[in-house]
Amino acid sequence: MAALAVLETPSGKDALAEGLLDLLSPAVQQLDLHVHSVRESQVELREHIDNLASELCRINEHQKVALDLDPYVKKLLNARRRVVLVNNILQNAQERLRRLNHNVAKETARRKTMLEASGAFTPRSPSKP
């Protein structure tokens, strides 16, 4: 009951909200970095698929023996299309994460300003837990 009473006060809610924001912010940033890394890998994979498809077409044109590489080129192009699709999904997710991170930072700053203005917030020293 005492914990519930603390949470019902405005400063208790603000402290809880700030704690949640402090907890979520690093996770959002780390997830954003991972998404960015995956997007870079997707772009690199797409480039390799394009190069391989071009090379297969070139080989197919210069072959004296009738070797049908068209089905393989089509499979590569289909794989490339899927990579582009996944990359677009990741790009949208990363944009949402960026906006979420921005909103978290903005809300944290707003709440800290409110707490400092009310005198309820005293910045902690980094050397003291």
Image: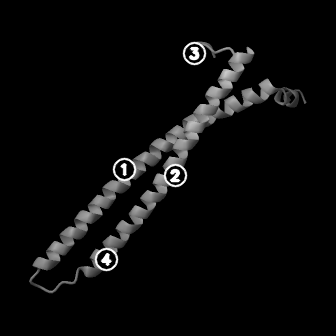
| Dot 4 or dot 1, earlier in sequence | 1
| Dot 1 or dot 3, earlier in sequence | 1
Q: Nearer the viewer, mark 3 or mark 2?
A: 2
Secondary element at image label 1: helix
Say if 119 sits above or below 41 in the image. above
What residue is at 19 percent from the left and 74 percent from the top?
57
Q: Distance between the residues labelled 4 and 1?
A: 24 Å
Residue 68 placement: quadrant: bottom left
What residue is at 15 percent from the left and 86 percent from the top?
66
Secondary element at image label 2: helix
| Dot 2 or dot 4, earlier in sequence | 4
- What's the mark number on residue 40? 1
Please tell me how crowded label 4 is: few (under 14), some (14-19), or many (20+) other residues with Cα within 10 Å. few
| Dot 4 or dot 3, earlier in sequence | 4
Q: Which of marks 1 and 2 is in front?
A: 2
Q: Distance between the residues labelled 4 and 3?
A: 58 Å
Q: Work out whether residue 120 can be spotted.
A: no
Q: How far apart are marks 2 and 4 (CA)?
A: 29 Å
Instruction: From the top left corner, tell me how far across and down residue 101 is, in percent.
Output: 56, 38
- What's the mark number on residue 93? 2
Q: Which of marks 1 and 3 is in front?
A: 1
